[in-house]
Amino acid sequence: MALLQISEPGQSLDPHQRRVAVGIDLGTTHSLVASVRHGVAECLPDEQGKVILPSVVRYLDPAQGGAGRQIGHDALSAQAQDPANTISSVKRLMGRTRAQVADVEKLSYDVVDADGMAVVKTVAGNKTPMEVSAEILATLRFRAEDSFDDDLFGAVITVPAYFDDAQRQATKDAAQLAGIEVLRLINEPTAAAIAYGLDNGAEGVYAIYDLGGGTFDVSILRLTQGVFEVLATGGDSALGGDDYDQALAAWVLEQAGQGAGALDASDRARLHREARRVKEALSGEDVESETFAVNLSSGTAIGQAVTPGEFESCTKPLTDRTMRAVRKVLRDADVDAQDIKGVVLVGGSTRMPVIRRTVGEFFGQTPLTNLNPDEVVALGAAIQANALAGNSQEGDLLLLDVIPLSLGIETMGGLVERIVPRNSTIPTALAQDFTTYQDGQTAMSLHVVQGERDLVADCRSLAKFTLRGIPPMAAGAARIRVTFTVDADGLLSVAAKEQISGVEASIEVKPSYGLSDEQIASMLQESFATAEEDMAARAVVEARVDGQRMIVATQSALTADAGLLSEKERQNIDERMKVLQAFLDNQAASAAEIEAATESLAKGTEAFAAMRMNKGIQQALSGRKVEEV
């Protein structure tokens, strides 16, 4: 007997089915993955119980028998010994050329330009920032799938609010390489607002001050009954806790009479690591001083006591830069400091007392810090992912994000006609009509730009395309409607249509850092090749879990209804169970062998399952009339 399960149109076959959706905070210094479980957002730990994954990847030398790469804590611990192949802060390279990366010469690894973007030279070959980020994202993906023992449906990934189109597209490319379906990219401050808004029932105008390891964002948001509206956003994509570490290290070298120019990559890595330790120590309560101690490769030993006041003094220019960005965003949002109901601090770097005091004095109130600043962005992203996956039944979350820079097209004379102003709520679609310049003009070239300047030369070129087939008309007679569509990830597509004839052309704006579809496909193949051993090990574990489940289910069925079987049928099932159990007990068994034995047991119990089903139906119908049924 075959049973069919039916449902109403548009409804799931299984109303209790839950899609595994996560929020990922892909950070400069560390990354996290979170998900909503039992109605509460929580960060997912690794096997050691750690929720924070250092955003560090070390590539090993294939000639030395290296196993590919180390990721996270293992890579971080080897940074001082192998700085040239240990990649940290790769987020700063995303969607950038080498010339666009601030302080690139201070990095412990070698950055060069290739295919129109910054890439990292390693013993395993040149690695793009997307490949490095994909290693981190894949590790978080596996952590989530192991936590739920299920495949990942999709993820909401956070990006700095001031990330431009190229940086956002690079983030999506990294996720694609990691095998992750991106449900949406959302700005980090917005994710923090989601976490605080839902946890605390917050309403009003709030400021989100987000100082991470490598980027700084500030956003002004209005929260009203589950609606998160971003009024303005700004910041500095090249300012973060790493810069505080470098400023402290430079000050210590100056006090010791050492020149930074004589340091090698290993020395810079040691100094950076020690500076971070001292910074974190000085962020504790009632700390009078902390000793900065490091041995350089030249044999010079540096030991310098650092007080909280000295740390604040040598990093004051950085703190002042963050407050200038705060003032600018307040002006953009047309609000005053006293209009702010609450200030949310996000990012591990906001643990520094100087930050909390400076922000508190500016806004005249104590900042909100009751959620872990390291975790709050991932938690907010998880809440949004849960809603986008259809798991949330409340339906009371509406996210209104904004674009950071204006979008427009070039007009005659090299001028910019803005079509989508900065801080416009997204997703959005805006259109404007244009006309031809010459009599008989049959084509129009459109140049899409991004920026706030009036001249095309001062803005960033995004794309060019041509609308052809315009009927010959007098100049000014044609009516060409240009439509800009910005999706929820902040990515742009542009269409042009001549209204009289109906001819049209469109383009999806690709970033200028230059990843073609062929390159993405090639990089996917390469990433699969490097992860082959990991995938094989993972397949064995999954096969063992499925096989064990099959044995438990079969044993349970035999306990209940073994009387339905003949002696020969029971013997056949027992033999198949023994074969599967033997493979499970054999640690050298392959995934294919275990899967074949599991499939054999499944087929061998099909007739038994049908018998049990018929028995259940007979029991349900026993003693009942046909009319009752």
Image: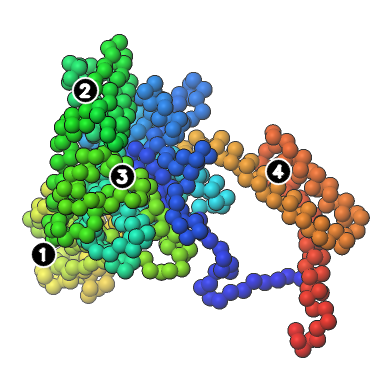
Identify the disc placed on residue 438: 1
Q: Which type of secondary structure does the marked residue at label 3 adopt?
A: loop
Give the CA separation, mark 4 to mark 3.
45 Å
Identify the disc placed on residue 594: 4
Three-letter code for the amino acid on which mark 2 is drawn: Val
Quadrant of the snapshot with the N terminus = bottom right
Mark 1 and mark 4 residues within 8 Å of each other at the beta carbon: no
Q: Earlier in the sequence, mark 4 or mark 3?
A: 3
Q: Name the one closer to the observer, 518 or 615.
A: 615
Q: Name the one closer to the observer, 63 or 608.
A: 608
Mark 2 and mark 3 residues within 8 Å of each other at the beta carbon: no
Give the CA separation, mark 4 to mark 2.
59 Å
Give the vertical position of 22 relative to 477 (above or below): above
Q: Which type of secondary structure does the marked residue at label 4 adopt?
A: helix
Three-letter code for the amino acid on which mark 4 is drawn: Ile
* Residue topped by disc 2: 252
* Residue topped by disc 3: 347
Q: Where residue 429 sits: x, y (%)?
A: 26, 66
